[in-house]
Image (cartoon, grey):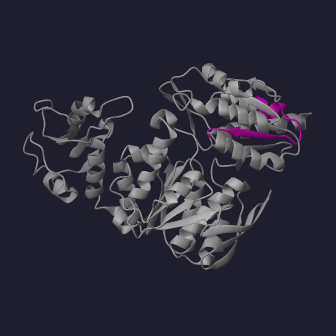
């Protein structure tokens, strides 16, 4: 289509800067490095750079025009479109270019601090059990039809998001479940998506380096629910204080809870090493649900998914079958050890104090010996949670090994010093091994038979961010190698 047609379909007017109306556009792009001939380049403000600085590069690679903020005539030797908000404009342009695919899908958005990924997997399984072909966009991976690839962001930039949804439609999907992060909402990545359902899991301290305080963090999450039509359901955890506030503000709440009185409420909850079994009271009667996932924190995720099924009027059979079908979620309380090992080991994404508390409280009963926790905190991120995570680890572990997470531009030793403030004065011993591979390896090598080693913070990630580099690294692979080495030593012994 031409730029004129694209702007007409997206409801945007054109600024002066050259006759661009009849210029044919073959894509909407924000990264100059991937521009192809015919693309429309949108110069967005990034965390470290202004996209306008790369406009010349984009034009040299074949971009036919530039969309940017505060551009003066003559800045670029090419047609340009001036806009007030490049990110918001990019989302609208991308949706229009791909024919508004969210209008052809049932889009379920999940948001919250903890539980988004697992809840997304569970909802996807329920929809599939109901015979509704479903795509998934999560922090672990993007699944479009039969294709699945590792995720780069929890929620991709709007052109990538719209392109994936269009491919979902073209490959026969009728629904899409997508994690919607607070960053994505504030950065307008989810603009121009028509959400059929929105799910709120919980809100605890995280990302305050970006949002500033809990009030603004919560306000960012609430943007997802502002996108809902009045007739669209909002599935909300009202055991969470922010969830209770949100449920009072939306038009059509469908609430769930373990403790509070809710639309979908637990009547009986049985947690064991074999998983979760719960009896749930719903508006249309009671239901017995089973899941192979572990712990109270996953019981909430199960309830969130079941409540979504209720909100969509899906059958009880689909809800039961979908929940039972999910045996594991990568990097979420993922057991890596096997029956051949004399110690147990699992990997989890827990990177906040609340998530770490829920994880350790859940797995504590599984340890026949000591509970050993290996973790660190990310650099250039919310510093307030570091000592809190140290306190939680010290209170719930028998031994703590502090290490590097994704240090980014920070000194890993300085990050660990912040964590140690929460451990100082407690009774739990801890050690520091800054090299993460060595920390994990040593924890498993020195564990006693019957101990449980928990490696927390990175979960499914396949890289470690050090400075400006993304180095290949996967916790589960390191754990498997350490366990294999331990078995070999045992056999030799």
Residue 390 in the figure: left or right of residue 193: right
Quadrant showing the N terminus: bottom left
Residue 63, picture quadrant? top left
Q: Residue furthest right?
A: 493
Residue 323 coordinates in the image, percent (x, y): 64, 66
Tally the marks: 0
Q: Nearer the viewer, residue 448 or 266?
A: 266
Q: Is residue 355 left or right of residue 24?
A: right
Q: Nearer the viewer, residue 115 or 354?
A: 354
Q: Residue furthest left?
A: 19
Question: What are the residue bounds of the magenta stretch?
Answer: 442-458
In the rendered image, residue 379, in percent from the top left (x then y), is placed at 55, 28
The answer to which of 407 and 420 lies nearer the viewer is: 420
Residue 347 on the magenta segment: no
User: Which image quarter is the C terminus in?
Assistant: top right
Where residue 393 appears, x then y in whole percent?
73, 35
Whether residue 384 is visible, yes or no, is yes
Q: Position of residue 77 (x, y in %)?
A: 12, 32
For the question of whether residue 147 can be seen, the reply is no
Vertical order, 481 against 21 (above or below)? above
Q: Quadrant of residue 302?
A: bottom right
Q: Residue at x 42, y 46 (%)?
A: 184
Query: Magenta includes 443?
Result: yes
Does 455 sit above or below residue 202? above
Q: Residue at x 17, y 33 (%)?
A: 71
């Amino acid at each position: 289509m031409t730029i004129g047609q694209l702007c007409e379909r997206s409801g945007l007017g054109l600024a002066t800067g050259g006759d661009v109306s009849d210029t044919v556009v073959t894509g909407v792009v924000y990264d100059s490095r991937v521009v192809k001939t015919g693309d429309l380049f949108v110069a967005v403000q990034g965390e470290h750079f202004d996209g306008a600085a790369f406009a010349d590069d984009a034009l040299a690679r074949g971009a036919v025009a530039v969309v940017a903020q505060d551009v003066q005539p003559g800045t670029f030797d090419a047609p340009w479109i001036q806009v007030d908000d490049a990110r918001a404009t990019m989302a609208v342009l991308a949706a229009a270019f791909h024919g508004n695919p969210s209008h052809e899908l049932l889009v379920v958005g999940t948001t919250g601090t903890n539980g988004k990924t697992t809840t997304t997997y569970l909802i996807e399984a329920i929809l599939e059990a109901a015979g509704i072909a479903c795509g998934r966009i999560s922090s672990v991976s993007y699944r479009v039809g039969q294709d699945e690839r590792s995720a780069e962001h929890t929620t991709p930039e709007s052109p990538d998001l719209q392109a994936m949804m269009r491919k979902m439609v073209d490959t026969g999907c009728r629904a899409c479940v997508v994690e919607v992060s607070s960053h994505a909402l504030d950065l307008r990545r989810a603009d121009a998506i028509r959400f059929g359902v929105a799910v709120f899991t919980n809100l605890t301290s995280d990302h305050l380096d970006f949002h500033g305080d809990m009030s603004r963090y919560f306000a960012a999450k609430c943007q997802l629910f502002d996108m809902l039509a009045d007739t669209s359901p909002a599935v909300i955890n009202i055991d969470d204080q922010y969830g209770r506030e949100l449920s009072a503000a939306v038009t059509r709440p469908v609430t769930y809870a373990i403790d509070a009185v809710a639309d979908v409420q637990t009547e009986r909850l049985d947690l064991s090493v074999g998983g979760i079994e719960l009896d749930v009271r719903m508006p249309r009667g009671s239901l017995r649900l089973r899941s192979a996932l572990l712990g109270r924190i996953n019981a909430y995720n199960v309830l969130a998914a079941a409540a979504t099924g209720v909100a969509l009027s899906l059958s009880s059979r689909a809800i039961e079958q979908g929940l039972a079908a999910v045996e594991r979620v990568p990097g979420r309380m993922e057991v890596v050890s096997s029956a051949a090992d004399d110690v147990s080991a699992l990997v989890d994404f827990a990177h906040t104090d609340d998530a770490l508390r829920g994880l350790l409280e859940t797995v504590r009963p599984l340890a026949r010996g000591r509970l050993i926790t290996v973790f660190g905190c990310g650099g250039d991120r919310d510093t307030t949670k570091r000592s809190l995570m140290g306190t939680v680890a010290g209170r719930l572990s028998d031994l703590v090994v502090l290490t590097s997470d994704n240090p980014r531009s920070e000194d890993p030793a300085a990050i660990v010093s912040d964590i140690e403030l929460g451990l100082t004065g407690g009774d739990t011993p801890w050690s520091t091994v800054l090299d993460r591979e060595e920390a994990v390896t040593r924890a498993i090598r020195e564990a006693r038979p019957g101990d449980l080693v928990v490696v927390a913070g990175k979960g499914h990630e396949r890289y470690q961010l050090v400075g400006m580099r993304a180095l290949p690294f996967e916790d589960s692979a390191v754990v498997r190698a350490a366990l294999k080495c331990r078995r070999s030593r045992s056999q030799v012994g």
